[in-house]
Amino acid sequence: MMLSGWGRYPAIECRTQVLRQLDEVGPVLSDNQSLIARGNGRAYGDASLNPDKTLCMGGCDRFREFDAERGVVDCEAGMLLSDLLDIVVPRGWFPPVVPGTKFVTIGGLIAADVHGKNHHRDGSFGSHVESLRLAMADGTVKTCSRDDNAEIFEATLGGMGLTGIILSARFRLRPIASDAIDETVLRANSLDALLRLFAEHDGATYSVAWIDCLAKGEHLGRGVLMLGEHAAAARGAAKQAPSGAGGGLSVPIELPISPLNTLTIKAFNELFFRFQIPKTRRRHYSGFFFPLDAVQNWNRIYGRRGFVQYQCVIGGSQSEEALRRILTLVAEMGSGSFLAVLKKLGPGNRYMSFPVEGYTITLDFPARPDVLSGLAKLDAVVAEHKGRIYLAKDARAPRDLIEQGYPDIGAFRKLRASIDPGRKFRSALSERLGL
């Protein structure tokens, strides 16, 4: 069948198989020369695509253990984050880190070592994983942690499924008093002002900014900063249906032509910026963490060609200059980005994990040939400032940019060669980038 990531670019014909029981993994490994595990297909590019065999893990979605007293979960890798939330939130717990969608699997969270709006304080999801069970290329199953098989464990965090098939994981939750978030909205008229707000509110548990990527001149990088804290039960929880739980908005068909262009995005950005009046409000956690989940199949609005998401991180003192240059180039490209998000990251994990201390910007672009070629200009800025591209979002980065951005890539390849000498675990991404 034809498969793609969430960006719907590229689409590749793949032989697929659904794993229903974890003990079925041995025959799958022995019967296939190459394969890659796939969760819910929410990596944007080609990370979960293998033409020979793409192993769909969604059938393995059961709890192995849930300690509701200590907030520890052990579950199969195919469990959706949305299902986990439905169980643990009413019992006073919340995942330590969540991405921008709840329709991802636990195995996917680990393979991409996802970061959230709290990375500057709490690190990535992998930082809270106590152990995981990994099916190796030779069919054996290893339990990996920071004490046992530590190198394999660390390489699996952000390893995009290339160290083995994640079967299950044990991780810690955070206690919460309600299902609500107290959100503070602040507005900034320029990139300088926005970065000052980030610095002033560095103590916030959650922070994320929307950016008007078409603004120019003195308003370059203007945006809206949203801060969040888990609400106290004493003030009452927000009684709101979780976004994306059904009955919401939907893009029912594949659009032949995308309605997103410079004019429509510019109009949306102007309206969004003006209506985001500084305020503090209480809202259900779904609206704060997963706003796009309220629109089912929103990836279809980019039309038949799909789109690419460009996410990079620039570390240290070079962040501000690099962000300014990137936003200037995006405004000059005229393609616009319907989604433009800025987050602050703290120190990251080893090997191929994406985060480094600095700022990460996320941009969406239609997958048109002219736009794809124009992204080379952004690559040049990232390379000059020693930044890196997020593999979970990538569909087109050049190999030399990845080589430069991930200094542990040589060690990752060496470890891969020692545990999988026949390169059984492969994906379109790993073949493209020589991983």
Image (tube, rainbow, N blue to C red):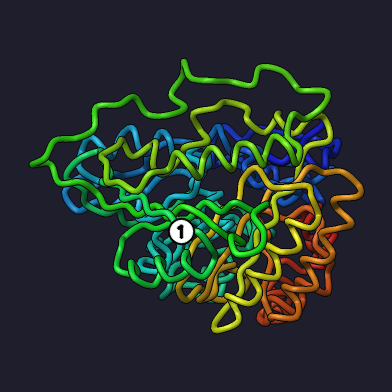
Between residue 183 and residue 99, name the one nearer to us. Answer: 183
Q: In the rendered image, which residue does mark 1 sit on?
A: 188
Q: Residue 391's x, y, as percent?
A: 68, 60
Q: Is residue 384 visible?
A: yes
Q: Is residue 390 visible?
A: no
* Badge 1 density bin: few <14, some 14–19, many ≥20, Cα 10 Å: many
313 horizontally vs 114: left or right: right
Residue 235, quarter of picture: top left
Between residue 200 and residue 61, name the one nearer to us. Answer: 200
Asked which secondary structure carries label 1, the reply is strand
Residue 318, quarter of picture: bottom right
Q: Residue 188's x, y, as percent?
A: 46, 58
120 horizontally vs 330: left or right: left
Residue 257, quarter of picture: top right
126 horizontally vs 311: left or right: left
Q: How many marks?
A: 1
130 horizontally vs 141: left or right: left
Q: Residue 346's x, y, as percent?
A: 45, 73
Q: Above or below — where is 324 with respect to 252?
A: below
Q: Above or below — where is 180 with respect to 207?
A: above
Residue, x 50% and y 76% (percent of image)?
Answer: 357
Between residue 92 and residue 168, name the one nearer to us. Answer: 92
Residue, x 31% and y 60% (percent of image)?
Answer: 205
Q: Residue 114's x, y, as percent?
A: 52, 57
Residue, x 84% and y 64% (percent of image)?
Answer: 376
The residue sitting at the front extreme is 218
Placement of the N terminus among the 4 image quadrants: top right
Placement of the C terminus among the 4 image quadrants: bottom right
Between residue 306 and residue 280, name the one nearer to us. Answer: 280
Question: What amino acid is labelled 1 in the image?
Answer: Ala
Residue, x 69% and y 65% (percent of image)?
Answer: 389
